Structure formats: structure tokens, C-alpha cells
Image: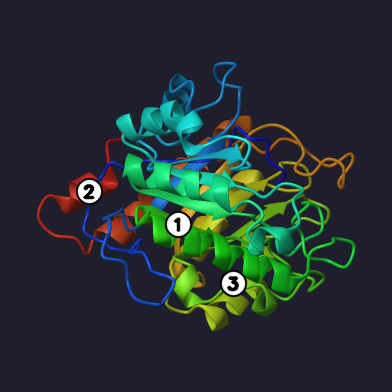
Amino acid sequence: MTLQPVRRVLVVGALVLVVLLASGASADGRASTATAQVPPFLWGAWIGTQFTGSEPPWDWQAVTNFDARNAGGRDLSVLHWGVGVPWVHEFNYWLGAFNLAQNAGALSVVDVETGSASLRKVAKGAYDSALRTWASEAKSWGHLFFLRFDWEMNGQWEPWGTRPRNRNTPGDFVAAWRHVHRIFTAAGATNVRWVWCPNIDPYREMTSLARLYPGRAYVDWTCLDGYNFGRPWTSFSNLYASSYQQIMRLAPSKPMLIGEVASTGHGGNKARWIRSMFQAFATRFRHVHGLLWWDEYGTPRPQHHPGRPSDWPIETSPASSTAFSRGISKTLTRMCRRLTGSAPAQCLGKATS
């Protein structure tokens, strides 16, 4: 989905638990010495302005309202939002937003993009000065966060896309990703987890994922984005299955994040769609360890999908909110039951209903 420099999903993450799913990897393939404990299942949303008129992390009341409406009062573990192009604003420009999420107990999943810059120029060092500053400041901040770099690169709707109509090739994307990753490694930014996030491709129309994967030493989490537009109505499993299997062949040892997902309510039963999504996590999609719902009104990539639905928020119906709340509860119960001591209670988080 097309992002403005300021928005995207949440997850409740000050839970210091026992699963080291986010252990980093350096550019030479060795595991990073700075590992961080994260919940066994990350979950949250990109939250729009519908609750308070402002978006998180700048208005945390919107998060509180989202939790109460869609999760029975249970805290999210991740906040998804975006910072735009790193040579437009340094990391410290966003420091207040990072701290708001961190102090509220949430991990940040942050979208960082190259905008309209040539990926070939990025790879050849044209923006190295700004990237070094960004990486150094991120390292100095020191807290764990997830970085989604140039997401949905297998499509053509973003300027960094790699389809024939774009000026970037798959090789340009891989070279740029590795180059930027090496800059962060050199800066010692081991608190950054790299999320490689293509779009689902159920009809095999986009760039091959095998040509876009930077390699196991350069990726910490894999990821997929995808929406049920309702034309035709398509289940989560049918939308995601083929791309999921491709990633399992490329990166079978990496945990996966669903980076953007939502369903319209037009053309089918949205609550039932949500229930079947959570059931799929327990059966067909066992490498999925995180979920970020796109909880904002508005058509993703409106310039490419005119007239498409915009009713993405969960709370568009009470039934959908109930389905999501129960789905999260069951998923956390399943993922947390292997923990011992006080960890299961921490993992499950509080819930008021």
C-alpha cells in the first residue's frame, strides 16, 4: 500500500519474553551479538485518524481506542508507521515518535523508502552520507525496531518497483538493499531488524521473488502484504498461499510478518474472512509470527485501483471486531502455551473482555 511519510501499524512490544525470533544477522552471515527478546507472536495495526482525528504514535489515545474496540482491551505489541526517505529527514527527526511508542511499551515497525531515487545510484553510494547519519543515530537510540525497506518491490506501483515499466531492475534492488544493510552493519546498528516485504502475487504477474531476495545474511524477517478487495471475494489462504510457499523455499528459517492485510466488507462476510485468517495461521501458515492489520479508511494505491473499497478498518462492524479479538486471543494462547514461569501471562497481555 502506498505510504505517506507518517503512518502504519502497531504491535504491543515491551513484553520482554523468551523467544529470540528477532536475532539479527550481520552482512557476513554471522548472527549479530545484539539479540532481543520479542513476543512469540507480534500483532498490531497501522491505525488511521478515525478514532481521535490523529494517527499514532503521535496520538496514543488512538491506540487505546483501537485496543478497546478490536482486542478486548489487550495491548498491541507493534506499531506500524512510516518515516519516508532517510536523506530527507535524519533518524533523530523522528526521535519523539520512536520514544512515544517505546515508552508506551510497543515495538515500532517502520517503513523506510528510497522514494524516486534510482536504486542503482543508491547501491553506488550516492546517498551514503545521509544513510550513515541515519544508521548512526539509530544505533545511538539503541532500542529494538523493525525496518521495512522499500516494501512491495515486486510490483510496479511504487517508484522503487521492479517491473518493466519501472526504471529499476531486480538486480538494482538487491544491490541497493545489501549496500544500505552494510552501512547499518558498519555503524553498529544491531538494534535494527530488517524486514523484506514483497506483495502477494497469487496470479504470478509480478517480479519473481527469487530474483529479489537479498540473501539470508541481509534479512531478519520475511513478510507479505495483501488485501481482499472483494472482486472476486478471496480468502486469506487463497490470496497468500502461493507467495508464502515461494518464501518458504527461499528462506525457510526466517520468521514471517504479515505486513499489511485487510478485507473489505463488500462482496462477502468480513468477520468470517477474519476468522478463517486466524485459523490459517494455526494450520497452513505456521511460519507467520506477526500480523499488522491496515486499520485505515482509504483505497490502497488509489491511482491504480480507482473505485476500489476503502472500508479496511476492523471496526467497520461489531462482528468483525469480535472476530479479530477472539482470533488474537486464540493465537496468543497457542503461541504462548509453551512458555514457563510468569512468561505466559506476560505473553497473553491484559484483556478487559
Is the residue marked by circle 1 packed among few (<14), some (14-19), or many (20+) residues within 10 Å? many
Mark 2 vs 1: CB contact within 8 A: no
Please state the horizontal and vertical placement of residue 21, each as a whole percent of the image. 34, 63
With 181 as the anchor, is 7 left or right in this view?
right
Q: Kindly identify the residue that appears in the image at 61 percent across and 23 percent down.
A: 49
Please state the horizontal and vertical placement of residue 57, each as a whole percent of the image. 47, 28
Distance, label 3 to label 2, CA atoms, is 29 Å
Instruction: Tell me the number on the disc at residue 16.
Output: 2
With 242 as the anchor, is 326 left or right in this view?
left
Quarter-of-image position of residue 207: bottom right
Instruction: Tell me the number on the disc at residue 184.
Output: 1
Q: Kindly identify the residue that appears in the image at 41 percent across and 47 percent down.
A: 136
Taking depth in this image into account, of 21 and 52 the one nearest to the observer is 21
Q: Give the vertical position of 155 relative to 283 (above or below).
A: above
Please state the horizontal and vertical placement of residue 78, each as a whole percent of the image. 42, 43
* First in sequence: mark 3 vs mark 2: 2
Taking depth in this image into account, of 172 and 318 the one nearest to the observer is 172
Distance, label 2 to label 1, CA atoms, is 25 Å
Q: Give the vertical position of 174 relative to 271 (above or below).
A: below
With 313 as the anchor, is 36 left or right in this view?
left
Kindly tell me whether residue 352 is visible in this rendering: no
With 250 as the anchor, is 344 left or right in this view?
left
Is the residue marked by circle 2 packed among few (<14), some (14-19), or many (20+) residues within 10 Å? some
Q: Nearer the viewer, mark 2 or mark 1?
A: 1
In the picture of the structure, the residue carrying the numbered disc 3 is: 244
Kindly tell me whether residue 293 is visible in this rendering: yes
Distance, label 3 to label 1, CA atoms, is 28 Å
Please state the horizontal and vertical placement of residue 211, each as a whole percent of the image. 69, 78
Q: Kindly identify the residue that appears in the image at 62 percent across and 78 percent down.
A: 246
Label 3 is placed on what type of residue? Tyr
